[in-house]
Image: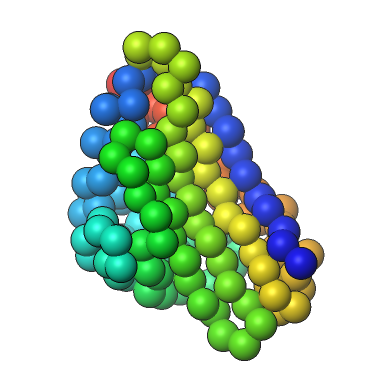
Amino acid sequence: MNFRIEKRIGVRATSDRIWELISDLPSWNRWNPVETEVKGTIAFGGALTLTETVPGLPERRYQAAVAQWQPFAQLVLHEKRGWQFSVVRYFEIEELEAGSCIFATGALFSGLRGEGFHDKHRRAVRAAYEAVAESLRLAAEG
């Protein structure tokens, strides 16, 4: 079974500007309060190393594979957290008209252990993703 946590927010910026923030991995710490350190390359089959700091949970460093990406539209990462636990982390941009977008960020938790993690930590993770969305909005609009 899959469990999703997502935050969608309107952003008064172009998809180019939002993608500029997302694709500049070394600068994520300037706008992203959760994934504070990101290294790697956005490419099909690429791997990223991320440091995640969700308030209320221990800081963790992990590796994720780039599952999908489309410039100016989406970045999808896949992380295998062990037996019966996978996470798909995503950042999506939907341009409604020039200078106006919907930005979505979230995660899909799957597997038996993923269900347990989701049930135990959903409030903290939801608040963290809300902070990511709001921080990106402020950076893109600023």
Query: Left or right of 49: which side holds 59?
Result: right
Give the residue drawn at x 66%, y 50%. 5
Give the residue drawn at x 33%, y 26%. 15
* The C terminus - image quarter: top left
Query: Left or right of 127: which side holds 132?
Result: left
Position in image of residue 24 (x %, y %): 22, 46
106, above or below 56, in the image: above
Task: Residue 70: name its quadrant.
Answer: top left
Q: Nearer the viewer, residue 77 or 129?
A: 77
Position in image of residue 64 (x %, y %): 40, 69
Query: Left or right of 70: which side holds 86?
Result: right
Q: Nearer the viewer, residue 100 or 26?
A: 100
Position in image of residue 136 (x %, y %): 40, 35
Give the residue drawn at x 35%, y 13%. 99
Q: Nearer the viewer, residue 117 or 42?
A: 42
- Decide if residue 48 is in sight here: no
- Colour option used: rainbow
Task: Residue 115: name its quadrant.
Answer: bottom right
Query: Left or right of 4: which side holds 11?
Result: left
131, above or below 62, in the image: above
Q: Nearer the viewer, residue 22 or 34?
A: 22
104, above or below 51, in the image: above
* The N terminus - image quarter: bottom right
Give the residue drawn at x 46%, y 28%. 94
Residue that sits furthest to the top in the current view? 98
- Decide if residue 5 is in sight here: yes
